[in-house]
Amino acid sequence: MNVLSLLAPTLLAAALLNSTSARADAVTEWNEYLEEAVFATAQPVPAQGRSAAIVHLAIFEAVNGITRDYHSYCIDQRAPHGARAEAAAIQAAYTTLCALYPTQQPALDAHLADSLAQIPGACGRSASIARGRAWGEHVAHHVLALRSDDGWTSPQPSFMGGFEPGQWRSIATGANADGTLPAVFPQNAVLTPFTMSEPSQFRPGPPYGAEIPDALLSPAYARDFDEVKSIGRIDSPQRTAEQTDIALLWQAMGVIDENRAARSVVRKHARLVDNARLFALLNMVACDALIIGWDSKFAYQLWRPHHAIRLADTDGNPATAADPTWSGLILAPRFPEYVSNHSTLTAAMMRVLSRELGDRHAFTLSSPLKPGFVQEFDRFSDAAAQAVEARIWGGIHFRTACQVGNQLGVELADAAIECLLTPRRRR
């Protein structure tokens, strides 16, 4: 599309309408199409946050460049006069999704045609819609360029961990002996953040207040050890059937599943720009929460319960007892333990929703990867609290890693809301 050719000065009277009259569904509609692309490409959770943040930041900047309600994140220009905000949102979403999920372009082409057809006036040669599309495409390319060298595709040295007591090493799988596989997604530890100044901005102190191996001598470590050893083992008699299902649900859920929950609670009559801002904040903090997790994991390199329990006779703590055959309910992901990614991620996303919509909302969480099991909540904070417990029940985290992650997620979300995409004026 030739952007400049669509910015001619002649406007139809209808072009004077802006997003205050535009339907708010464009944001949530294209969030659904993002979800389709994620599952169609089997995109792993560690990559979902970055993609969702790019898409929704572009949507926000496209709409906000027209309404000028909030401070911009990265676009200084004004949109062309009379550009239709809904068309801008649709085009920004389409352009970023095609760039991020190129194999899905045929489906996205069909969605684009359908979305545009639903805009009032689309059946004619609407200058306002054309201008909105041109602006949305321009914004999308700007956001994509901004993130083109953010470190996601930069080769990273292999992180193998170590074999000293307390140090993370990979779990044996198939023909690979313990410790022979590198940690996955190392780029998340150095990825350029969306809302933070640097990946280590929210890095917590070391686990149990000390570096490894001294951390293993802590009474708190021994308490966490005993808890996960008992309730997190694959055949634990202490874990209820419901707790098992909950642990497996949270293992299946990703960033996009929590987006689905957000779609269900957005205000039905919210303005387009307000929904655009909400989903931009939601997904930028989701990406940064994962950065916090990987930064801390690689900084402290704490072993997972799998090795902690099997090798407890090497940790120097007389309050821990080894079980050489212990396995958790869930096979631990291939990266260090502290802090819990999922606890940080969910706390951050739920905090954004709580701050923006109020904590008390009825909603459900589910995942196509665990069909038939749904969790119902009355508060966003309840979901964040359950994420903490689920990782312990699954046998992949110590309680301290989950509690610290939960607190970091809250702090991240609060900082983002207070510093970014803030209103230009009080309404």
Image (cartoon, rainbow, N blue to C red):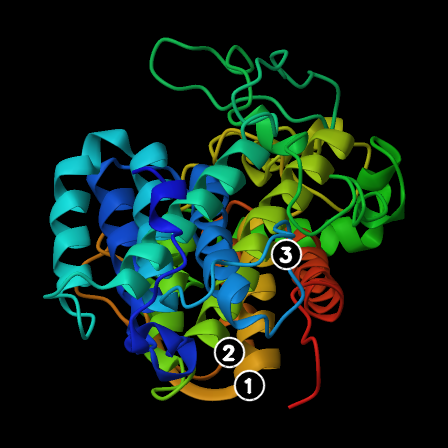
Q: What kind of residue is marked 1? A: Asp
In the figure, residue 301 lies in which quadrant?
A: top right
Residue 104 against residue 273 in the figure, above or below: above
Q: Which residue is mark 1?
A: 359
Q: Position of residue 228 (x, y in %)?
A: 57, 52
Is residue 80 or residue 10 the one in the foreground?
A: 10
* Label 2 or label 1, whichever comes before in sequence order: 1
Residue under the point 41% across and 68% down: 82
Q: Secondary structure at mark 1?
A: loop
Image point 83% across, 53% down: which residue? Answer: 219
- Amino acid at pointer 3: Cys
Q: Which mark is residue 380?
A: 2
Q: Residue at x 59, y 75 (%)?
A: 69
Q: Nearer the viewer, residue 384 or 276?
A: 276
User: Which residue is situated farthest in the front direction here?
Assistant: 10
Query: Is 206 in front, or is 349?
Result: 349
**What residue is shown with label 3?**
402
